[in-house]
Image (cartoon, grey):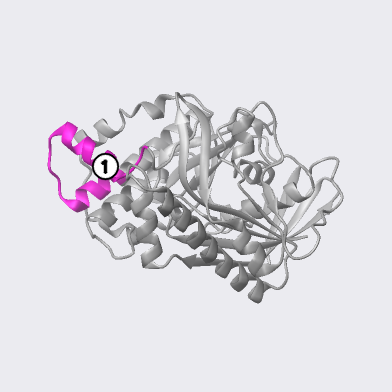
Amino acid sequence: MRILGMISGTSHDGIDAAVVDFQHQGTALLGSVVHTQSTPYTATLRARLEGALPPARTTMSEVCELDTLIGQAFARAAVAAIDTAGPVDAICSHGQTVYHWIQGGSAFGTLQLGQPAWLAEATGVPVISDLRIRDITAGGQGAPLVALLDQMLLATGNFTRAALNLGGISNVTVVAPDGTIVAYDIGPANALIDAVVTDRGLDPVGYDRDGLIAAAGRICEPLLRKLLEEPYYRLPPPKSTGKELFHGGYVQDALDAVGITIDDADLVATLTELTVQTVAAEVRASGSATVVASGGGCRNPVILEGLRRVLPGVSVILSDELGAPVDDKEAIAFALIGWYTMHGLPASVATGTGAREGRVLGTITPGAGALRLPEPVPEPPTSLILTANR
């Protein structure tokens, strides 16, 4: 079964897509990555999206319009992927998260925009969407859903290992030698860096390309100490967070609290070191011998070199080595979740999200004609072997 996985992450800069051809063989699932692509949002759409995200106030009319505009952007990206890769059996679209409701450490709701009917109409194939909420109704955080992919990719080994995603928010899946996992959001990876780069006009692309800004600055220790006082870091897992907490105003509040003024490069360097220190603390606490990293933060050498600097004795490798390209891993993860949902299998990992038990995820919007699901699979596969065929 060929599934197109799609997501726009917490950096909200565009749409990542991956077509994966899955074959179920015994206890293993084989996944051939047929096609991957990244489609930037238009400058106008990204500006409107940024203007509606917390802590900004918005209106129901703006939410409605963004739901349509993002859905149409996803539909165009889906058509382009199918035109290149060939037909798919289903699309699994995570859409764009605009709000994740956390209160007292528990998740109560989540909102992803990108109306799936636009994708179904444009492609004629069924679309699985609204993926996080079922886990939340079962008492989970609704995140990180990528834990399913992490657990399957790291299924073998007699030592503790961790899968690390460095998107807008950093999250980690720690896999014990017996295969049990703990997964949670660590804190900001690129979110605060991107906010400062964008707000201060430091680079037109809105992020620190190749870590050049951070490399030119010096770490401000008083500000770093203040940022590390954030209570979220001391909450036990499972836990999740997002730009509801970590946004540009958060940085300004920290600067005001410290009562200092620093130049732009020093600020970016300090925020980059915040990512390094918070991630490293969790890796040390987990006892992981290997970290498999993915996400846009892997393109920032200051982050990767910083992790290797402060984690001596820990092997930090890229997910490419396991067949999941660092820029495409989340899209591949949602293609996998789509395969699970179409076959009636729970795709949320309860020990990762904190739910009472795993749940079949998502809502299915039919494509053209009658909706036909494959026969349910009674037992889920225990491992995933990914290969690139692009």
Q: Choose between 315 and 265: the one closer to the eye.
A: 265
Of residues 363 and 222, the one nearer the viewer is 363
**Residue 353: which quarter of the image?**
top right
Residue 386 drawn at (x, y percent): 69, 56
Label 1 Cα neighbours within 10 Å, binned few <14 / some 14-19 / many ≥20:
some
Q: Secondary structure at mark 1?
A: helix
Q: Quadrant of residue 46?
A: bottom left
The residue positioned 79% from the left and 42% from the top of the image is: 380
| Left or right: where 27 falls relative to 19 | right
Decide if residue 128 is on the left or right side of residue 299.
Answer: right
Q: Main secondary structure of the magenta part?
A: helix
Identity of the residue drawn at 86% across and 41% down: 378
Query: Which quadrant would the N terminus be assigned to in this image?
Result: bottom right
**Which residue is under mark 1?**
249
Relative to 351, residue 74 above or below: below
User: What residue is rendered at 49% in x and 35% in y?
Assistant: 240
Q: Position of residue 61 (x, y in %)?
A: 42, 53
Report x, y in % for residue 267: 22, 47
Which amino acid is tagged 1? Gly
Q: Is residue 368 magenta?
A: no
Residue 160 visible in this rendered orientation of the protein: no
In the rendered image, the vertical position of residue 364 relative to residue 183, given as above or below:
below
Q: Position of residue 156 (x, y in %)?
A: 70, 41
Q: Quadrant of the image for the C terminus?
A: bottom right
The answer to whether residue 22 of the structure is visible from this angle is yes
> What residue range appears in magenta?
245-271
* Closest to the observer, 245 or 116: 116
Q: Is residue 89 left or right of residue 356?
A: right
Q: Is residue 251 magenta?
A: yes
